[in-house]
Amino acid sequence: MPIDYLFDYHPYHGGKNPKHIGASVQLLKFKNGDPQAIQFFTSHVEAKLKATIPSGTGFSVATVPSSTVGKAHRGFGPMIRLLKGSIPEINNDVNLLKRISCITPLHKGGNRTMSVHQKSLKAVDSIVTAQKVVLLDDVTTTGNSLQVAAGLLQQAGADVVLTLALCKTV
């Protein structure tokens, strides 16, 4: 499945990257739960969902979990609540994926091979066969986490109709 993304991401690199502006700055704020950044990305995700999924088609939203077990991305919860307010076809309240073992974040030198993700992610048991699912991630670099997550959802019976990252590392 192809991975779509909304914006290029230029890493911070300790403040030494002159291209770390615009959506790149907003992404770090989104990860920290900044309401303005959440609204910024929500409006773009909403437009993508409305352009991709026919009106009246029910679907669920899954997000690639944080690298730490039990830790939620601060931006995705509020984003999904906002999306549910404007897209009534979204029909889930809990994430369809969970992290079952911690992995080192990529920006801290973590190994992000597909096998690392396969060992640390799990689809929840509540997926309904043929349930349409949109899979979201904050940033993609290799695409491995999104590919593994999409595969796990599909193995559990979901029909992944869109795989979307807010940003792609360039």
Image (cartoon, rainbow, N blue to C red):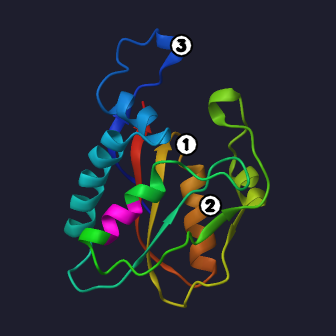
| Front label number (3 vs 1) | 3
Q: Upstream in the sequence, badge 3 or badge 1? A: 3
Question: In which quadrant is the C terminus drawn?
Answer: top left
Residue sticking out furthest to the front: 35
Q: Quadrant of residue 87?
A: bottom left
Measured as percent of width and height from the top left, residue 68 is found at 71, 48
On whether residue 31 falls in the magenta region, the answer is no
Residue sticking out furthest to the top: 16
Measured as percent of width and height from the top left, residue 169 is found at 45, 34
> Given the image, on which type of amino acid does mark 1 rest?
Thr
Q: Main secondary structure of the magenta part?
A: helix
> Given the image, on which type of amino acid does mark 3 rest?
Gly
Q: Upstream in the sequence, badge 1 or badge 2? A: 1
User: Distance of mark 1 from mark 2, alpha carbons?
Assistant: 11 Å
Give the residue drawn at x 34%, y 85%: 58
Residue identified by numbered label 1? 142
SS of the residue at dot 3? helix
User: Distance of mark 3 from mark 2, alpha carbons?
Assistant: 30 Å
Residue identified by numbered label 2? 148
SS of the residue at dot 2? helix
Give the residue drawn at x 49%, y 75%: 93
Q: Residues within 10 Å of mark 3 (few under 14, many from 20)?
A: few
Residue identified by numbered label 3? 14
Measured as percent of width and height from the top left, residue 46 is found at 26, 61
Name the mark on residue 99: none
Which residues, given as a range, are shown in magenta? Answer: 80-84
